[in-house]
Amino acid sequence: MNKPVLTIVVPCFNEEEVLAETSAQLSSVLHELVEESMISLDSMILFVDDGSRDRTWELIEVENERNPNIRGLKLARNVGHQNALLAGLETAAKHSDCVISIDADLQDDITVIHQFIEKFWEGQDIVYGVRDSRETDTYFKRTTALGFYRIMERIGIKLVPNHADFRLMSKRALDELLKYKETNLFLRGLVPLVGFKSTKVYYDRKERFAGESKYPLKKMLAFAFDGITSFSVAPIRFVTFIGFLAVLISAIAGGYAITQELLGQTESGWTSLIISIWFVGGLQMLGIGIIGEYIGKIYHEVKRRPRYAVEKDLYTNIIKEKQQSEAVIN
């Protein structure tokens, strides 16, 4: 087996505080792998700038100039973490035998990248980086994350628990993933659908090296809801169940009211009437909201708009120039 070309894809959004350190640490790992003859000398690190408003792209260009193993991809605007990651994967897939995705905050343990490559040499197409524990998380985040994975399992969505987007994918696995053209991306759910041989590598997650988290509570909740609605119709079925339950309760209450009327024991009650109206009204609004969420996703899907636009590509251009040079020499 020839030494594989590896590309490490790193999506970035306002990461100027950590980018230099991330670049240095990932470069060190890349050089070690090359020296150990585990990957090709043509392997690279690809930073994807997701429309950052700080100096992230400037720093990527600096790293690109001084380090031949670092390249950059600048998106025309902010399209979100999943789309930015996909942009990097699609760009890297054309010239790589395997691709590793990792966030720029250095919370994922980059030393296990050696194990990723070892598993790849053993024939694994997908290697998941899985957190061994969540001790660095707050109690709230740890509890909600556990609840999220349990809900996803209950409604039939196959996820790898405690796995984010730190993974290795072989070229054929990545090519299969890129056949999924949906607009509402939830890569953690799509990758397991690809199939092929897969395994897990466990590691301890670290504290963020610098800067602030790009996933506050609001974004985390939205991301979780997107994951659920992108892979399951369970919420709509839940609304149907609640509606059926409400009708059943109403029928029982109606039967009780008729019985009381026949027995002559009825009393006019404003409270019970208002509570009933609010309860039914709330159920209707909940049902309309959930159904509307699915209709909104259909609306976005059928328009088939591009998921991102590339402003500058320092990865593909360099590779094309290199290929042209080699062709001239040959």
Image (cartoon, rainbow, N blue to C red):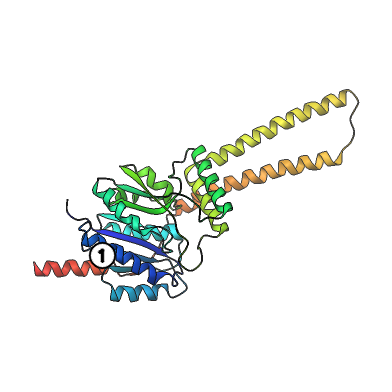
* Residue 284, percent from left and from top: 67, 43
Task: Tell me if 172 is positioned left or right of 50 in this view.
Answer: left
Which residue corresponds to the image point at 86% horizontal and 41% vertical from the top-left? 270
Q: 154 or 211: which is nearer to us?
A: 211
Residue 269 sits above or below residue 68 on the image? above
Q: Residue 234's quadrant in the figure? A: top right
Q: 121 or 10: which is nearer to us?
A: 121
Q: Is residue 227 visible?
A: yes
Q: 43 or 24: which is nearer to us?
A: 24
Task: Tell me if 244 is positioned left or right of 135 in this view.
Answer: right
Which residue corresponds to the image point at 89% horizontal and 36% vertical from the top-left? 268
Task: Tell me if 42 is positioned left or right of 161 in this view.
Answer: left
Number of marks in the image?
Answer: 1
* Residue 172, percent from left and from top: 27, 48
- Quadrant of the image containing the C terminus: bottom left
* Residue 84, percent from left and from top: 41, 61
Residue bearing mark 1 = 31
Which residue corresponds to the image point at 87% horizontal and 26% vertical from the top-left? 261
Q: Residue 95's quadrant in the figure? A: bottom left
Q: Is residue 73 visible?
A: no
What amino acid is at disc 1? His
User: The residue tagged with tag 1: helix, strand or loop?
Assistant: helix
Which residue corresponds to the image point at 82% horizontal and 29% vertical from the top-left? 257
Task: Tell me if 184 is positioned left or right of 273 in this view.
Answer: left
